[in-house]
Amino acid sequence: MQNVLGRTAAAKRQAARRAAKLAAKEARETRVIQRNQHRNNEKLRYEDIRKARKTRREDWELGPLAPKRDVGDFKHTYGTVSQLRLQDSFAHLTKKPIKESDSWLYVGDRVVLLEGRDKGKIGTIDEINFEEQWLTVNGLNMADIPIPKWIKDTEGHPEHTVPRPLAIPLTGVRLVCKINDPATNQPRDVIVERVRWQSELNVKTGKREKHRIIPYINHIIPKPAESTPEEQDTPSDTLRILAEEKTFVPTLLRPPMPEQVIDELRGKYSKFRDRHDEDFIAKKKAEDEAKSPKNLKVTMRTPAQDLSKRDKQLKKEARMKRYVPFEEILAAVGAHMAKKQGVVQSIGEQNKESVVPPPPSTSQAPEARP
């Protein structure tokens, strides 16, 4: 049975190592893809900047003779940016990516932009992507994106362009909240430089909740309210009264499903199985007991090993000679106890003989002497 458990443990360790290697490989491949994607987006952005500079220079030098560029294929899409710039990634630019559990930003928070053409403007977060480390702000960092022809043909879109917010790295924004000004006692927007997490007990729910707090002033930044969209019931939806109805109640007399099904779900012949039936365990124990005498094999010994073994045996015998055998010690102790008990009994008998019995007591008065 120990062999079976050992094989199971080894298989689990091997599977864990294989999964860790696969996860590390996928992480490296993901970072390479993100790096290449960001490099391509930067090339597109710099190309648009170079074209804009060249166009501005030509318009300034040629004046009224400057060519008209919003014609032909660019009649309705001149000045737009490529759709590839919408798919950007900033995860490879940070050594310690911000995790969702440790993030101090939520959808609906008011933030200020620290970079881009809308630098210094305040907006509301629409979307956050922690995997690629970017977010979008409502109405800020917007760009016109051309609509492909196949979308216009299938959906019948009348417009040729659509405004879309470009991705902003998570490190390119700062949180904004309202704090009362001590001079005017009126709320004003303040850019938060540092945020600290603090856990407090909610009296209503009895659970501990985490709050964002501005250090040194202990001002709590409330979490924005989550808007839940209204869901419409369709004919394919199951009614709640039908979903909560108990159609099967298992009893204690039989399992909720046949035992064969349990074995199939558990993976009866899986190498990762560590819970076995009692019959299988008894069978394996019997096999181990049957094989145990066969494993006791006499191995070859060198002359040096035989000499060492004989020296140890002689030392052990010499050491045992210095000690009195245990049986003799018990016999001596028993004889001493018996002798001591006999002496005590003889002393007791002598004491009984030396004691003089008292005279008999009578109730009559003594006779007078003549």
Image: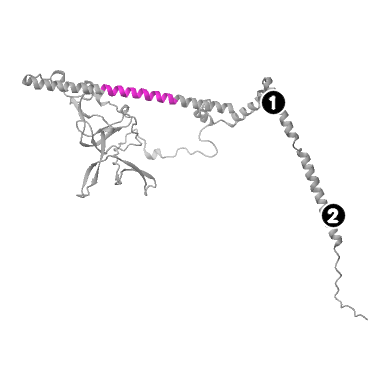
Q: How crowded is mark 2: few (under 14 residues within 10 Å), some or many (20 or more)?
A: few
- Would you name the residue on which mark 1 appears? 309
210 relative to 152 in the view: left or right: right
Which one is nearer the viewer's eye here, 64 or 324? 324
First in sequence: mark 2 vs mark 1? 1
- Quarter of the image with the C terminus is bottom right
Query: Tag 2, which secondary structure?
Result: helix
254 relative to 154 in the view: left or right: right
Where residue 87 sits, quadrant-wise, is top left
Mark 2 belongs to which amino acid?
Ser
Q: Which mark is residue 225?
A: none
Which one is nearer the viewer's eye here, 25 or 281? 25
Q: Residue 346 carries which label?
A: 2
Which color scheme does this rendered protein use? one colour
Discs 2/1, front: 1
Q: Residue 91: x and y, percent?
A: 32, 28
Q: Residue 56: x and y, percent?
A: 12, 23
Q: CB under 8 Å between callouts 2 and 1? A: no
Q: Residue 180: x and y, percent?
A: 23, 47
Residue at image position (40%, 25%) is: 24
- Quarter of the image with the N terminus is top right
Residue at image position (46%, 25%) is: 17
For marks 2 and 1, give the CA distance.
56 Å
Which one is nearer the viewer's eye here, 79 or 365? 365
- Magenta residues: mostly which secondary structure? helix
Q: Is residue 366 magenta?
A: no
Q: Residue 88: x and y, percent?
A: 28, 26
Above or below, comparing residue 254 to residue 30 in the picture: below
Q: Is residue 27 magenta?
A: yes
Query: Tag 1, which secondary structure?
Result: helix
Mark 1 belongs to which amino acid?
Lys
> Magenta span covers which residues?
19-40
